[in-house]
Image: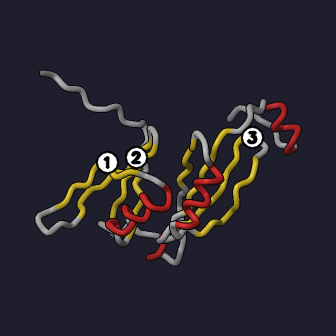
C-alpha cells in the first residue's frame, strides 16, 4: 500500500529559542499553534519540533550552533519577523495572545493594503505580525493612499 507524504509549504521558518519546550507550550497557548512533530532523544530532550497553523508550518528549535540564537541571547535583536495570515478573528486572536503573555507591540489596525494587522512579541523576544484580509484594495488605491509607487524591479 503506497502512501504519500502530506504537502509541505515551500518555506518553513525555523524559530530559535533558548527553551524550545517552553516555547512549544507558549506558542500553543498564546497563538493557538498546534504541535505537529516533536522528536525527542532518550533523555526526553526535544531534537526537532514543528507546529502548524492552517496550512503554515514553523520549526521550533534550540540554540544548537553559535549562529543560532534566541533574541533573548543577543540583547533582543531580531533578524526576521514571522507574518501569519488568519482567515478570521484577528481581534480575538490578539486578545488571546495578550492573555497568553505576548507583549502587543501594535494593537489591531486596518492597513492601507486591505489587511487588519497587529504585532506581538513572544516570550523570548521574537516579533510576530498577524494579519487578516478585510477588503480588496487595488495598486492604484494603495498608491493614492500612501503616495508610494509600485514599480518593477530593474
Q: CA distance from mark 2 to mark 3?
A: 26 Å
Residue under pointer 2: 52
Say above or below: 35 vs 69. above
Q: Which residue is mark 1?
A: 36
- Cα separation, mark 2 vs mark 1, equals 6 Å
Q: Quadrant of residue 63?
A: bottom left
Res 113 label: 3
Q: In the depicted view, which residue is nearer to us: 33 or 139?
A: 33
Query: Which part of the image, by quadrant, shows the N terminus?
Result: top left
Lateral position of residue 98 relative to residue 24, left or right: right
Q: Which label lies toward us, 3 or 1?
A: 1
Sequence-wise, the earlier of marks 2 and 1 is 1
Question: Is 18 displayed left or right of 129 in the figure?
Answer: left
Between disc 2 and disc 3, the foreground one is 2
In terms of image quadrants, where is residue 98?
Answer: bottom right
Residue at image position (37%, 53%) is 59
Q: Is residue 154 left or right of residue 139?
A: left
Residue 136, numbered circle: none
Residue 76: percent from the left, percent from the top? 53, 74
- Mark 3 Cα shell of 10 Å, populated few (<14), some (14-19), many (≥20): some
Q: Secondary structure at mark 1?
A: strand
Q: Marks 3 and 1, Cα distance to the nearest angstrom? A: 32 Å
Amino acid at each position: 500500500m503506497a502512501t504519500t507524504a502530506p504537502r509541505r509549504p515551500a518555506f518553513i521558518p525555523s524559530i530559535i529559542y533558548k527553551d524550545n519546550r517552553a516555547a512549544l507550550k507558549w506558542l500553543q497557548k498564546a497563538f493557538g499553534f498546534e504541535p505537529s512533530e516533536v522528536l525527542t532523544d532518550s533523555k526526553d530532550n526535544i531534537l526537532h519540533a514543528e507546529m502548524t497553523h492552517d496550512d503554515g508550518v514553523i520549526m521550533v528549535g534550540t540554540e544548537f550552533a553559535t549562529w543560532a540564537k534566541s533574541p533573548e541571547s543577543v540583547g533582543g535583536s531580531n533578524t526576521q519577523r514571522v507574518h501569519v495570515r488568519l482567515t478570521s478573528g484577528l481581534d480575538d486572536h490578539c486578545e488571546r495572545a495578550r492573555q497568553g503573555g505576548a507583549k502587543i507591540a501594535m494593537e489591531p489596525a486596518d492597513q492601507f493594503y486591505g489587511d487588519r494587522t497587529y504585532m506581538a512579541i513572544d516570550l523570548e523576544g521574537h516579533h510576530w505580525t498577524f494579519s487578516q484580509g478585510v477588503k480588496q484594495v487595488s495598486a492604484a488605491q494603495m498608491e493614492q493612499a500612501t503616495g508610494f509607487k509600485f514599480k518593477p524591479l530593474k
